[in-house]
């Protein structure tokens, strides 16, 4: 896209007014999106976007400029704008670039660009037919979406770093709406990864459509959820929404430095049960949040955030790492060239334990089993959260009981992690688009099956529903906090208050 000589010239101009550091992020993004609704392919989009962002910092001041003109004139103009924003100093620099090789690679077997649009459209049509076949009377609406992105990036900076990378991501989502008995319910099923069209080798769109419809249909006859404190089993199939929201955002270094994290200043302290280890690993094969280099050109690597209950590290980009006098650990991410990089999660998960999921269920006695999480919000300053339960069941005498609807979970993230009683040997991932500071980036998160709280009085989670359970206090259900919406082909998870 941009040769080394022009990159060096651009960086030299960016540093010419006294900057301490400068970098340039160049990208070309090819996007395809196909959306189906009411049995018809309603939206077909494809296109290419390209541009570059130039950043300069001097002391604590940072300037950022971007352009969609990738010729010499456009890049140098952006560099001059960024440089001039920092003052009238003078600095003569010589930049020499050395290309870095990735420490991890992701194999794509079938590039989306090699697949005909008609074949992609067949995927959403198959999902639609399968969903409707579940129950022609009660399934009232089906929406299905396919999307792929091929992003080529070039990143260089004034220290001499230069990387080139290609990122290929494919995603698929189905939403079914069922109505009956005076009730309307929704079921969603989604899959995505840093993969090509081979995503469908392991995720059959017909099975995904049927699963979404079966979930929506089952919720029509589900009992109203109880309310009150009770043991909660978070199944591995629920994914890591809890750890992402109630823990992960609070471990992003910029929020810590701004005093907006409940985990600020607690390095080396116990912040969770000894059975809890939290890792963010952008090198995982096929996962939606994976990458070889972050958006500042730092090689990806696993980062252990909490080890056996003790806070060990935060997620850093270059700027937040500079403020703490350390190196970035590869978590500077941005939505596009139009955005500056900030610390972000990639693939965040609680490591698997040793307990059997069946044993965990028996130990719970009476409570709530969460098999799929819905939307939610968290206050990173306090750790307080509220989540919707998309699929939940009562637990009675250690056995799975009837399905319930309308449940919410409220509590405090650090307190929940301290009160985890058992950690399962399984591990289940979910995917989404994480929102922060107006930017969305692809992520995945995971957890094993976990038991939170030994009994009603001991549980740190309050289940909100429409009726009381036992002697627990009545809690008003919190509605409308949906962060996994269906907008065309894109499953989006907004994680901001």
Image: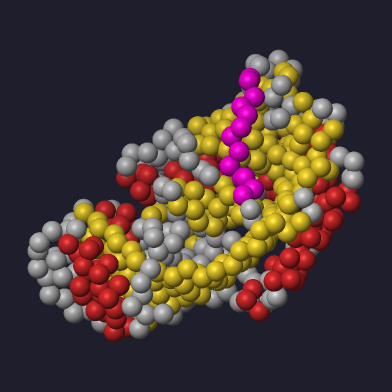
Residue 488 image point, x, y percent: 63, 53
Please state, as top left, top right, bottom left or bottom right, where the N terminus lies in the image.
Answer: bottom left
Q: Main secondary structure of the magenta part?
A: loop
Residue in the image at 79% along x and 54% along y:
39
Vertical placement of residue 470 versus 416, above or below: above
Please report the residue visible at 64 percent of the width from the left and 35 percent of the height from the top. Answer: 388
> For this view, does 148 lie left or right of residue 4?
right
Q: Residue at point 38% right, 68% down?
A: 68
Q: How many marks?
A: 0
Residue located 73% across and 19% down the image: 467
Q: Is residue 232 above or below residue 162?
A: above
Q: Position of residue 303 (x, y in %)?
A: 47, 59
Residue 6 position by quadrant: bottom left
The colour scheme of the drawn protein is secondary structure
Is residue 159 located in the magenta-colored stretch of the structure?
no
Position of 488 compared to 105: left or right?
right
- Against 163, is 223 above or below? above
Q: Which residues are magenta?
A: 475-487
Residue 193 is at least partly visible in this image: no
Residue 485 magenta-highlighted: yes
Q: Position of residue 44 (x, y in %)?
A: 65, 63
Residue 328 in sight from this viewpoint: yes
Query: Looking at the image, which residue sits at the far left?
Result: 89
Residue 245, image x, y percentages: 53, 43
Place residue 73 in its image quadrant. bottom left
As rendered, which of 271 and 19 lies closer to the eye?
A: 19
Q: Nearer the viewer, residue 213 or 474?
A: 213
Left of 459 or right of it: where is 370?
right
The one nearer the camera, 66 or 294, is 66
């Amino acid at each position: 896209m941009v040769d080394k000589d022009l990159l060096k010239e651009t960086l030299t101009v960016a540093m010419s007014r006294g900057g301490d550091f400068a970098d340039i992020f160049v990208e070309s993004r090819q996007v395809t999106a196909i959306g189906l609704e009411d049995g018809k392919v309603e939206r077909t989009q494809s296109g290419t976007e390209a541009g570059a962002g130039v950043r300069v910092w001097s002391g604590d001041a940072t300037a950022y400029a971007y352009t969609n003109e990738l010729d010499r004139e456009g890049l140098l103009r952006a560099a001059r704008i960024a440089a001039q924003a920092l003052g009238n100093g003078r600095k003569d620099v010589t930049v020499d670039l050395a290309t870095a090789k990735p420490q991890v690679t992701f194999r794509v077997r079938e590039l989306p660009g090699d697949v005909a649009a008609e074949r992609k459209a067949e995927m959403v049509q198959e999902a639609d037919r399968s969903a409707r076949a579940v129950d022609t009377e009660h399934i009232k609406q089906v929406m299905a979406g396919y999307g792929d992105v091929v992003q080529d990036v070039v990143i260089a900076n004034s220290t001499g770093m230069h990387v080139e990378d290609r990122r290929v991501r494919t995603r698929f989502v189905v939403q079914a709406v069922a109505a009956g008995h005076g009730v309307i319910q929704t079921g969603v099923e989604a899959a995505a990864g840093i993969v090509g069209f081979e995503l469908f080798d392991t995720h059959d769109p017909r099975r995904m459509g049927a699963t979404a419809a079966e979930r929506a249909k089952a919720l029509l006859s589900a009992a109203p959820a109880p309310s009150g404190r009770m043991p909660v089993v978070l199944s591995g199939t629920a994914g890591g929404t809890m750890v992402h929201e109630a823990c992960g955002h609070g471990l992003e270094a910029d929020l810590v430095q701004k005093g907006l994290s409940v985990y600020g200043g607690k390095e080396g302290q116990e912040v969770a049960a000894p059975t809890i280890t939290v890792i963010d690993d952008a090198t995982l094969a096929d996962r939606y949040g994976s990458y070889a280099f972050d958006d500042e050109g730092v090689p990806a690597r696993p980062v252990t955030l909490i080890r056996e209950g003790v806070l060990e590290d935060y997620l850093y980009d270059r700027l937040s790492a500079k403020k703490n006098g350390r190196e970035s650990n590869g978590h500077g991410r941005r939505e596009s060239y139009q955005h500056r990089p900030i610390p972000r999660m990639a693939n965040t998960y609680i490591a698997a334990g040793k307990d059997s999921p069946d044993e965990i269920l028996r130990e719970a006695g009476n409570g709530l089993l969460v098999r799929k999480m819905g939307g939610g919000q968290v206050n990173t300053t306090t750790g307080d959260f509220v989540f919707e339960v998309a699929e939940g069941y009562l637990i009675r005498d250690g056995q799975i009981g009837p399905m319930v609807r309308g449940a919410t979970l409220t509590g405090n993230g650090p307190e929940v992690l301290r009160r985890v009683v058992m950690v399962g040997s399984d591990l289940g991932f979910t995917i989404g688009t994480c929102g922060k500071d107006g930017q969305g980036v692809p992520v995945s998160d995971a957890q094993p099956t976990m038991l939170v709280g030994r009994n009603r009085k001991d549980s740190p989670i309050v289940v909100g529903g429409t009726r009381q359970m036992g002697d627990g206090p009545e809690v008003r259900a919190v509605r409308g906090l949906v962060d996994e919406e269906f907008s065309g082909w894109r499953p989006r998870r907004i994680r901001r208050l």
